[in-house]
Each structure stands twice: as C-alpha cells, then as structure tokens.
Amino acid sequence: MEKLLEQYFDTLWPICRSITGNGLRQSFKILQEIIPLELTEVPTDTQVLDWKIPKEWNINDAYIVTPDGKKIAEFKVNNLHIMNYSISVNKEMGWDELKNHLHTLPDKPDAIPYLTTYYKETWGFCITYNEYKNLPQQGSYKVYIDSSLQNGSLTYGQYVLKGSSNKEIIFSSYLCHPSMANNELSGPLALAFLYKKLAKKENRYYTYRFVLAPETIGVIAFLARHGHALKNNIVAGYVLTCCGDNGKITYQLSKRTNTIADNMMQHFLETKYPNSVIRDFRVGGSDERQYCSPGFNFPVGTIMRTPYKIYPEYHTSLDNKKVIDFSALKEVVCLLNDICQAMEMNQPIEPALLYGEPMLGKRKLYPEKGGAGIMNDDLIYLLSIITLSEVNHTPLEIAQRLNTNILQLNTALTIALEQGLVKKKIKQ
C-alpha cells in the first residue's frame, strides 16, 4: 500500500487545485482510478444553505518581471506563488503599487505562503520573505496573470458502498488546495485507500458513504442536497485531514462528544495507540464544522496526526513531500479499517440461554481435561460474552469492561453467536 500511496501522491502533487476548476476535476479523475466517485457539478450562483457557489476559476500562467529583467514568482515553478482565485492582470507598475499585492511570512523567511481570495475579486502573489526584501524599489515591474473567473460549476464527489442496513458511516475529506502535501493530499488518499479495503469486505451490515469535496463550500453544497435525508441514517463519521506526517495520531471529538464514533475511536486509541491524543471539539477546523453545524449535528469526529495550524509547515510551500511518512499514512488507513470492522461486530447482543452457565464441553468449546491453566484468553472472552451480555449489551461495552481491544473478542463472539449462546438483541 505504501508504494501505491506514494505513486498517487506524486501524480496528484503538481496539479493546481482550487474550490472549482479544471485542476479540481483532473484530480478527481485520478482518484477515480482508486474509488469510483460519482461527481456532481453545482452551477455558479446556486444557493447552498446560507452560501452561494462562486464563479469558476482557472489559471494558465502567472509571473512578475523585475525592473532588471528577472522573472520571479513563477506559477509554473510553484503554484503557491499565485494567490488562489486571483483575477487576470497584464500591466506594468511601480513598487508602491506592487508591494500591496505581495505576501510573505517574515517568521518563515524561506517559505511561500498559501493564500486565497475566493469571495473578493482581487489578485496577489506569494513569495518568500528572503526574496521580497531583496527586490528593487525603483523602476517598472511587469505583472502577468493569465486566469479566468467566469460562470461554471463546483465539483464534489461521493460514493455509497451499500450494506444490508441503511444505517451509514460517513468518511469525508477535502480536495481544493494546490501543491501542499499533508494538508491537501493525505486526506483524499487515505479515504480512497480505505474504500479499497472496505469494498473487499463481504456481508457488510453498515452502508459506508465516502465524500470528497472542496473544503467548506463543497461540503455545504453536498449537505444542501443530501443533508436532511441523511439525518436519520448517519450513526458515525470521520473527517480525514492532515494524516500523513509522522506525528501522534490525534482525534477530535464530535460536538456531541459521546457518540459511537467518539467512543469507538477513543477505545481504539486507548487500547492500541497509547501515545495518541484526544482533544475536544473546537471551531475553526475542517469540515467537521459543517457536519456538526446546528441543525445537522451529525456524530462526526476528526482523525489526523499533527493537527492543522500546529505543524510548522502548515499552509506554506514547506508542506511538501518531505513532510509525508507513507507508513504513517498507511497506519491511519488501517486504523479506520479496524474501526469499521469493530463497528460491524458491535451489534447489541443478549444471552440466548438463561439460568446457569451453558455447558461448553458438550459443544466442544471447553478443554477435555480440567484443572489449572485451562483458562486461556479465548475461553475467558467466550465466557465473558455469555455472562456479561445480560448487562453489557454491546461487544464494545464488554471489551471496555475487560480492558481489552474489541477486536480481540471477534473469534469468541462469532462462536457464541453460531452456537446459540448469545443472540442479536431485538431493539424495542
């Protein structure tokens, strides 16, 4: 998986993406090789909840020529040089006018900042502070931006992997940034490769919905069309962001804080990832803001490694392939796959046989010879499931009581159900 993750990363990396446009569509087309996303185009000016879809932006080239004839801030060298959504410009100007359109990070003098102007028609260039401070302040600069801003559409993708139940677990990530690694490509790649794993699973109980959209406005467009229909079906969900560096796995709780999504993730991190971090819900993050917004308030948390705004390369040209640890990205995919396996097995159960412990020997589930040392883990798990299911009705509750990971109970739970020692609990 690591090699394939890297190959797709390298293919997607050079593309200049935004919240609309051909770069976004090109990126979706590449990801459709992994996950069969069904794409929706939402026309410019469409009202989506409290927002409107902006004009579509595309860009071909951009650069500045200094008074001494040097070409700088070349879009084709690094697509972060152009402020995303800049309007077309082709003119000469002096330093006093140009400097108001140049953006730098003095505290990170070798980094190109990432800036956008989605909802105001203006333009700008982003350069390193070290380059900025050496620019001549006399003479004429040529500024060239070959871009278009016109009526078009916003693209988002989703795919529904059906299970036997209409109850859904949703996974969501965003696709809208230009060449940034952890903040842009780690989430979509993790989501796509998680799909590959779950698609192989037979007899799925839950339906799994995968959503990939431009951050904020794209998910708002998705929720405008599908949100109300999903309110009765989504039981858990996770937003995937910044999950490709080698920092500790971090989970941000949903706004409701006590959902099965929260409880299951906390259980896994406590039992399998002791160095992980769990933090409260907060505003100002990623698309969990939309899924957890008033009215929807879905049970959706956020999975990441080093959180956005905390890792020093965030929203700069320093967020490049050097930041990515593909084994760490794979670990996030495997964690989420394990979470889904646990969700599948976490159906409520109750005892099938009452009054006295069932005789396991006649079912060939107990050692022929009794005595010291016969109580191995599998036998303890089986007896625990039989006994505790009267008061702890889900495998997760039983696992928490035993202080073990829920997946450790899988074999014993399968046997208990097949042998008629416990049964699925009928909801009242």
Image: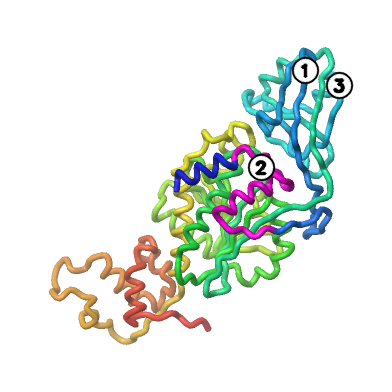
Q: Is residue 20 magenta?
A: yes
Residue position marked by numbered label 2 in the rendering: 177
The quadrant holding residue 222 is bottom right
Q: Is 13 on the left-hand or right-hand side of 388?
A: right
- Element assignment for label 2: loop
At horizontal 58% and vertical 73% (from top left) the residue drawn is: 166
Q: What is the CA distance from the residue labelled 3 to the residue labelled 1?
A: 10 Å
Tell me residue 285's x, y (percent): 64, 48
What amino acid is labelled 2 in the image?
His
What amino acid is labelled 1 in the image?
Thr
Where does the magenta region start and end? 13-39
The answer to which of 133 and 214 lies nearer the viewer is 214
Tell me residue 165's x, y (percent): 54, 74
Q: Is residue 153 visible?
A: yes
Q: Is residue 323 above or below residue 173?
A: above
Q: Is residue 131 magenta?
A: no
Q: Is 95 on the left-hand or right-hand side of 381?
A: right
What amino acid is labelled 3 in the image?
Met
- Element assignment for label 1: loop
Residue position marked by numbered label 1 in the rendering: 66
Marks 1 and 2: CB-CB under 8 Å?
Answer: no
Mark earlier in primary sequence (2, 3): 3
Q: Is residue 293 above or below residue 104?
A: below
At horizontal 27% and vertical 82% (from top left) the residue drawn is: 358
Q: Is residue 354 above or below residue 412?
A: below
Mark earlier in primary sequence (3, 1): 1
Residue position marked by numbered label 3 in the rendering: 93
Q: Is residue 280 visible?
A: no
- Element assignment for label 3: strand
